[in-house]
Image (cartoon, helix red, strand yellow):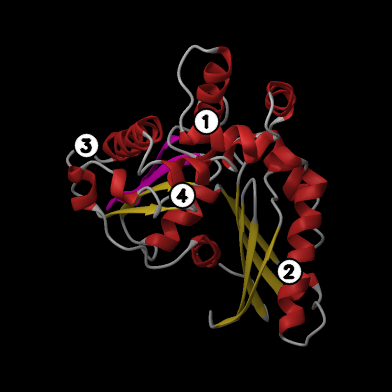
Amino acid sequence: MLTPVRFLIGVDGGGTGTRVLVAAADGKPLAQAEGPGSALSLGIEKAWQTILNTLGQAFAQLDSPLPPYGDCGLGIGLSGVHNSQWAQQFKSLSPGFATLKLATDGFTTLLGAHGGKPGVVVALGTGSIGEALYPDGSHREVGGWGYPSGDEASGAWLGQRAAQLTQMALDGRNAHSPLTRAVLEFVGGSWQSMMGWNGRATPAQFAQLAPLVLAAAPTDPQADALLRQAGEDAWAIARALDPQGELPAALCGGLGQALHDWLPPGFRRQLVPAQGDATRGALLLLQR
């Protein structure tokens, strides 16, 4: 049971961004704010600092000081929660919220997309994950293995492959194309800059190349092929969760809508619009 509080707070924390939704005790939205990434892979203390700073920005929109944490219930969907040690460390550093419920950002995306009812989501952002809630109340997850061995169809996955094509073009192993020229310009324009950028690039930085893939696709068969493969991989995640396609499915995340035209027709027919985002799902998490 949720401890009586003055405010409900929903947080969506990923590798490249953090979104906070402040609601009244009855669930009525009051304010939203956005900040930098708060994935646990970026550091436990940094995650808390980012979340609390972004929460302060949300309350500033209400012309209100940040209330005592004990007056707030906090639901968080956070990237990196799969690592149980990180999750426990994160919870142990709570500054004193009346209620704290923590789940993966994929699960809060699922709750928000279908209003807490059964369904499937494939969330494509910096990383990727699939989640399903079944009519019997059980829950299953597919993917979410993380970069570099997982995260198929994600921004980091697309960017890494775009970088690989650019490296091959620099070597003469394939021809330059609109995509590889755009990537090379993005990283500095030379072999040396490509080498240096690639050696220090994080998943979030690889994901910055995803818009270049989308922009090049109309005139670049290599970019188009990458997006079609991403579409197939996204559908494979959904089929693993719901082989018969019986549940409503939503494609979410920063890359989800952008990838729509490259999805297989069978997957597109299963899709429904998301009812709400992961911050709404984090509020629903508080009520479970």
Which disc number belongs to residue 155? Answer: none
Segment colored magenta: 128-144
Q: Residue at x 55, y 47 (%)?
A: 104
Name the image quarter holding residue 142: top left
The amino acid type found where label 3 is placed reads Pro
**Which of the marked residues, 4 or 1, is nearer the chain's N terminus?**
1
Q: Residue at x 72, y 67 (%)?
A: 98
Which disc number belongs to residue 255? Answer: 4
75 or 223: nearer the viewer? 223
Instruction: Indicate the position of residue 130 as horizontal and vertical percent values.
Output: 40, 42
Q: Which residue is drawn at 64% across and 41% down?
A: 204
**Which structural element holds mark 3?**
loop
Instruction: Indicate the position of residue 140 as horizontal and vertical percent values.
Output: 39, 40
Measure the C-alpha gap from mark 3 to mark 1.
Answer: 37 Å
Measure the C-alpha gap from mark 4 to mark 3.
Answer: 23 Å
The amino acid type found where label 4 is placed reads Leu
Which disc number belongs to residue 55? Answer: 2
**Pointer 3 residue:** 243
**Which of the marked residues, 4 or 2, is nearer the chain's N terminus?**
2
Is 137 magenta? The answer is yes
Instruction: Indicate the position of residue 91 as horizontal and vertical percent values.
Output: 73, 49
Measure the C-alpha gap from mark 2 to mark 1.
Answer: 40 Å
**Which of the marked residues, 3 or 2, is nearer the chain's N terminus?**
2
The amino acid type found where label 1 is placed reads Thr
Disc 2 residue crowd, few under 14, some 14–19, many 20+, Cα 10 Å? many
**Which structural element holds mark 2?**
helix
